[in-house]
Amino acid sequence: MMLRVMAIALMLTTSAIAMDGAPWLPVMGAGLITPPTAGLVSHWDMSYSGSTLYDIVGDNDGTLYNSPAFNAAYGVRDDGVWLQESSVQYFRANGLQNDFDPDSGTISMWVTIADFADTSAALFSWRYSDWFEAYYNGSDILFRYGDGSNYITTPGDISDYFSEDEYAHLAFVWDNSGSGYKAIYINGSVAVDATGTWTSGSASSANYYFGYLVAVFAWDGYMDEIRLYDSPLDGSDINTLYIYDEP
């Protein structure tokens, strides 16, 4: 009888369906899914000491600017970093230009938006001979690499995807070869994608920033679990990242 009960329980667990109709996947605690590691260059899980933000898989520790606060109660797993636009708080990924070719890759991150009315909130940026950036403009998230008009933009209003002060998972995927595919994922699903090669440039002396573009473009909200890959992940991998870290 004991064996029959255990078998029934296992069958019910593995065949469960989430409310959105997607198959239920067990969390990492069950040891059955793990985030993708191939091509993983850096992972900032918000472990820090003083003004240093640790890269737990690479050698690209970040420098924290203007003393942002960390709060375990508002982290995806442990600490989340609270960036305040009024104080221009952000971090710079040191040495990343030596390990990362920006022609293709993926950035995965968890964020909250403190104010949906904010029209100049930078998620990340790289500035050298060309622009590589993503920011929130008060309604949409925009992502570009190259000249100023070459953006992809999330459709509708960002509040259609997540709520103020609640974490959402964002992933930015790009491959500046072949068809030049690029995409923005929100909570594991494609929000917008497009093709067309973007202008690219050398990154030999670039600075990579998270939560900062220029002084008037800074993030206002939390960030956590930022991963950078040197290859474009597919939809299955993006969904795994979303499910694995989902608060």
Image (cartoon, rainbow, N blue to C red):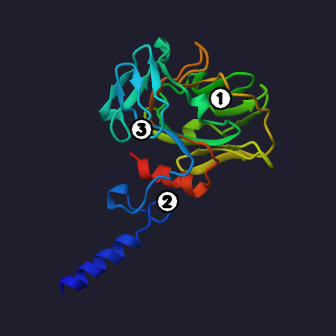
Q: Nearer the viewer, mark 2 or mark 3?
A: 3
Task: Quote the CA–CA distance across marks 2 and 1.
Answer: 32 Å
Q: Name the amino acid, label 3.
A: Ile
Residue 138 visible in the snapshot = no
Q: Residues within 10 Å of mark 3 (few under 14, many from 20)?
A: some
Secondary-structure class at tag 2: loop
Q: Up-down: is 204 above or below 24?
A: above
In this figure, which residue is indicated by the disc labeled 2?
A: 20
Residue at 52%, 25% in the rendered image: 94
Which callout, 2 or 3, points at the residue further toward the start of the chain? 2
Q: Position of residue 170 (x, y in %)?
A: 55, 41
Tell me the quarter of the picture where residue 32 sits: bottom left
Graded by Cα atoms within 10 Å as few (under 14), some (14 to 19) or many (20 or more), the crowding at tag 1 reads: many
Measuring 37% from the left and 56% from the top, which residue is drawn there? Answer: 28
- Residue 56 bears which disc, if any? 3
Tell me, yes or no, whether the two marked residues, 2 and 3, touch with CB atoms within 8 Å.
Answer: no
Q: Mark 3 falls on what kind of element?
A: loop
Mark earlier in primary sequence (3, 1): 3
Figure quadrant of residue 218: top right
Mark 2 or 1: in front is: 1
Which is nearer the eye, 161 or 102? 102
Residue type at numbered disc 1 = Glu
Residue 73 to residue 207: above or below: below
What residue would you read off at disc 1? 133
N-terminal label among 2 and 1? 2
**Which residue does the image show at 36% across and 27% down from the upper left?**
48
SS type, badge 1: strand
Question: How far apart in space, not on screen, are marks 2 and 3 (Cα)?
Answer: 33 Å
107 with respect to 183 (left or right) = left
Looking at the rendered structure, the kind of residue marked 2 is: Asp
Separation (CA) of disc 3 from disc 1: 23 Å
Disc 2 packing (10 Å; few <14; some 14–19; many ≥20): few
